[in-house]
Each structure stands twice: as C-alpha cells, then as structure tokens.
Image: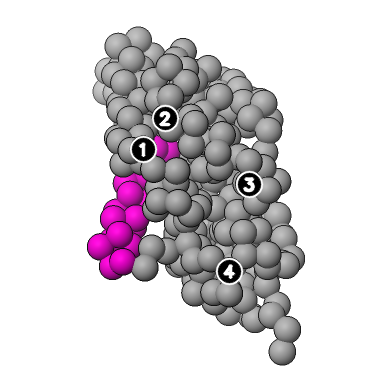
Amino acid sequence: MADEVVLLDTWISMFGMRVRVALAEKGVNYDYKEQDLKNKSSLLLQMNPIHKKIPVLIHNDRPVCESANIVEYIDEVWNGKSPFMPSDPYERAQARFWVDFIDKMIYETWKKMWLSEGEEHEAWKKELISIFKQLEDALGDKTFFGGDTFGFLDIALIPFSCWFYTFETYGNFTMEAECPKLMTWVKRCSQREAVSNTLPDHNKLMYVADNVSCTIVSLLRGLMFGMRARIVLSEKGVSYEYKGTRCQEQEFFASTDESNSQEGSNSDP
Ligand SMILES: N[C@@H](CCC(=O)N[C@@H](CS)C(=O)NCC(=O)O)C(=O)O
C-alpha cells in the first residue's frame, strides 16, 4: 500500500516548519492542509484532541502529534536516507535535551521581550541573546549540531532563523554581531533545498509581527478602559454583576501561546 501522508499545519509555524524540513529531507510526498487556528477544523480537533495544535502528521490515517516527536517518527519510518538521530545514545539524549531547551526558552523569551518596554525589555533581550549564545556554544566548531550531517537538532532550530530579523528589529541588536558562528551555521543550513524551500521570507514574518503588535496595542488600550471602570466601581464600593466576554486579545494570546494555551484564555484581566 502506498503511504498516505497528510500534514495539518500553518505556514507561519516554526514547529510546522520542522516537519516540512524533515519530510523534504527524506523526500516524502504529502498533502499539505493549511489550518485556521482561530477556527479549528474538525479534522484537527479529531486528530489532536489533547492539545488541538498543529503540526499533526497523519500517516495512513493515524495521527502523530508534537513536532519533535513527529521528526523522530519521520526519521524512523523513512529510514532509507541518512538518519537525523545520532547513533550514540548519549548524543541522542543531548540532542533531545537541546530541543527541549529550544522549545521551553526561545518563544517565551521572545514574547516577553516583544511585549515589554524599557528596562524589562532590555533584560528580556539580554536573556534572548544569551539563549542563542548557549546554543552557539553547543554547536562549537562543528558543521552541524550532530557533527558532519544535518540532523535532529538542526531541524528543530533552523525554523527559528526566519524570525531572527523580527527579533533583531524589535530588540535592536544583530545576530551576526552577537552570535557569528551560529549565523554561519544558519547560512550553511540555508544552502539545503529542504530548508530554503521551506522557510518563508523574513519580511513576511516581520509584517505579521508588526500587524499583531498594532492589534495588541489597540486591544490592550481597550482592556485598560474596562479595568479603569472596574477600579472606579470598586473604589466607590459599588457592587455590580460582571459579565466578562472573551475578547480578541485573549483569543490572540490563546492562539499564539505555544507553551500553555490555557493561561490567559479564561480569565478577564
Ligand atoms: N509543542 C508543540 C507546539 C505546537 C504549537 O504551539 N502550535 C501552535 C501554532 S505554532 C498552535 O497550534 N496553536 C494553537 C493553539 O494553541 O490553540 C509542537 O512542538 O508541536
């Protein structure tokens, strides 16, 4: 039976890009289904009922969720081409450690830098740069993270590089000056067709970030008015019935919060 492979994804997702790079590296044909995360399809809800997130790889009608898990699955199923995972158990454990580090640290820190101002912004920017410096140290003088061949950790990190321009612009720093070796690695990876054909143009991502920023600023302003009214009512000791509605700002954070979509989605600030 021929393999039937479907990918539920959104073009902008770093996690989805991991899967697209992995499939391209292995030369797997698949049916790409772009998802609207504000209006999740019944297929997505059915295929990932636990997290309800993309990416989901559906292989012969069976779903596989979580990008790093999907990349490992692809490596095991389409094992005819060079493996993504190191053969040494210790090296595999190290690669998984760093992928977990990337997942826990980069997006959360970037979001904090993006949404803060002044000293707080500067502190998060320092933190973001230090995360990339730690990854640069892990790369050392190697060609790729696992040595001579493009592998698991390269696939997990390279999608973030198309966001570097946005990080740099919002943080007013340059990755080239801060992490020159990591940038050489980015250029090396970008020479691979699987990477260059998958990662979107950084200007498109910058445009998305700019538009989202404008939306957040205007929505937060709207929320401030609500808060102001609640403070005045409480100062005056007026009891009232509060009917919170889930507003666009909360929808935004719910749909972009990679680590915990529950936080901020149910409570009115
Ligand atoms: N840990 C997951 C993260 C996936 C994720 O955060 N996907 C986001 C898009 S980039 C999503 O589907 N968000 C929808 C939601 O949170 O409801 C992975 O590695 O696959």
Q: Nearer the viewer, mark 4 or mark 1?
A: 1
What residue is shown with label 2? 181
Q: Is mark 1 within 8 Å of ligand 1?
A: no
What residue is shown with label 4? 81
**Is the Cβ of the residue at disc 4 closer than 8 Å to that at disc 3?**
no
Tell which circle, 4 or 1, labels the residue nearer the N-terminal end. Answer: 4
Quick check: 34 above or below 216?
A: below
**83 or 68: nearer the viewer:** 83
**Distance from Cα at disc 4 to Cα at disc 3:** 15 Å
The local crowd at label 2, few if under 14, some if 14 to 19, many if 20 or more residues have their Cα within 10 Å, is: some
For the point 44% across and 46% down, which residue is it? 144
**Is the Cβ of the residue at disc 2 closer than 8 Å to that at disc 1?**
yes
Q: Nearer the viewer, mark 2 or mark 1?
A: 1
Instruction: Report helix, strand or loop for mark 2.
Output: helix
**61 or 3: nearer the viewer:** 3
Name the colouring of the figure: one colour
The local crowd at label 1, few if under 14, some if 14 to 19, many if 20 or more residues have their Cα within 10 Å, is: few
Q: Main secondary structure of the magenta part?
A: helix
What residue is shown with label 1? 141
Tell which circle, 2 or 4, labels the residue nearer the N-terminal end. Answer: 4
The local crowd at label 3, few if under 14, some if 14 to 19, many if 20 or more residues have their Cα within 10 Å, is: few
The amino acid marked with disc number 3 is Arg
The disc placed on residue 192 is 3
**Distance from Cα at disc 2 to Cα at disc 4:** 28 Å
Tell which circle, 3 or 2, labels the residue nearer the N-terminal end. Answer: 2
The amino acid marked with disc number 1 is Asp
Instruction: Report helix, strand or loop for mark 4.
Output: loop
Quadrant in the picture for the N terminus: bottom right
Q: Which residues are magenta?
A: 88-113
Quick check: 115 above or below 264?
A: above
**Is the Cβ of the residue at disc 4 closer than 8 Å to that at disc 1?**
no
